[in-house]
Amino acid sequence: MKLINLGIGSMVGTLAGFAIAVNPATASSLLHTFSNPGEVGTIDTSTGVFTPVITDAPQLTDIALSDNEDLFGVTFSQLYSLDLNTQASTLIGNLGASINGLGFDNNDVLYGTGGSNFYSIDTNSGLATQIANIPNFSSAGDIVFNPDDNKFLGTSSTPNNTTLFSIALDGTATEIGDIGFSNVWGLFFENQTLYGYTSNREQIIIDTDTGIGSFDKNVTGTTRAIGGAGSLPSKDPVTVPEPGTLLGLLGLCFAALGTKIKLQSKVKSLKS
């Protein structure tokens, strides 16, 4: 009987785990505002609702989330660690460079962009080391790692548009194409979809092959400019179970419960 109870508990726990996994507002999808003080919080891409968690952060130019879910942010000149649980912003150190784009690769190395330069950043000291100068690139405000080709995607500013670039870890870069929106200051992947965020709170979906952006929805929950975005750099996307799978698990739970009731009835019959 204990085995049956354990089985039911395990299946219920599995279903509860699924309920948590498909929650769209997770710490893997984050935005911040370019304001003083700054806001950092979660974004539900299905609704466009931004929920501030930290409301008194420095005026950040970008954020990045490591595989260990350690959150970092930069002003133009300084690196901070950010804690969504305590809402604390802790200064790590001076960058020694002007940086407005930030992202981790799949080895948990932090990189940044500023102007036409590409940097690696020491998360212990904050010091930025220039890797390369990228021709025809002017950092618009974010980079995001694409594990499919082991390169970053980054946004570059033009007077009336934003261009998507592919940037290798050695700083070698290729222009992909015009996004069609100005001031795309935030990028992240969610469920293998590249989302972009403009300063005036537009959520767009970007084609990684052509760079073309398509309007998705407006971001609500703040009236401030969106300054950047962050996501887990190399973990597999959350897989939402098919309805049939959930129904099957529920069926197993009820079947096990029925077996338990039948066994209990037989035990009572034998005792009588």
Image (tube, rainbow, N blue to C red):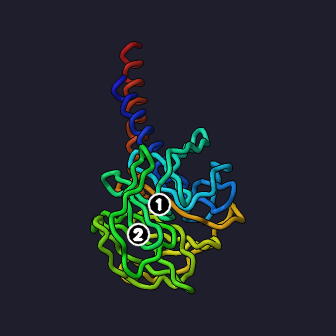
Calculate the distance from the C-alpha at mark 2 to the C-alpha at mark 1. 9 Å
Residue placed at 52% from the left, 67% from the top? 186
Residue 174 placement (x, y as % from top left): 33, 79
Does dot 1 land on a helix, a strand or a loop? loop
**Element at label 2:** strand
Whether residue 15 can be seen here = yes
* Chain-order first, disc 2 or disc 1: 1
Of residue 230 and residue 74, the one placed in the foreground of this image is 74
As shown in the figure, which amino acid type bears the numbered disc 1? Ala
Identity of the residue furthest to the top in this view: 271
Q: Residues within 10 Å of mark 2 (few under 14, many from 20)?
A: many
Q: Residue at x 57, y 80 (%)?
A: 182
The answer to which of 83 and 157 lies nearer the viewer is 157
The location of residue 238, given as percent across then percent down, is 41, 55
Location of residue 210 by image quarter: bottom left
Image quarter where the N terminus lies is top left
Near-viewer residue (192 or 21): 192
Please rate how many residues cluster around mark 1, counting C-alpha atoms within 10 Å: few if below 14, some from 14 to 19, many from 20: some
Q: Residue at point 35% right, 74% down?
A: 166
Relative image position of residue 243 (x, y in whole percent)? 43, 58
Which residue is label 1 attached to?
97
Please count the marks in the image: 2
Q: Which residue corresponds to mark 2?
A: 117
User: Would you say the residues marked 2 and 1 are in contact, meaning their CB atoms lie under 8 Å apart?
Assistant: yes
Q: Amino acid at mark 2?
A: Asn
Label number found at residue 158: none
Residue 199 lies, with reference to residue 243, above or below; the image says below
- Residue 254 horizontal/vertical position (percent): 43, 41
- Horizontal side, residue 149 vs residue 242: left or right: left
Q: Nearer the viewer, residue 39 or 79?
A: 79
Whether residue 238 is visible to the viewer of this picture, yes or no, is: no
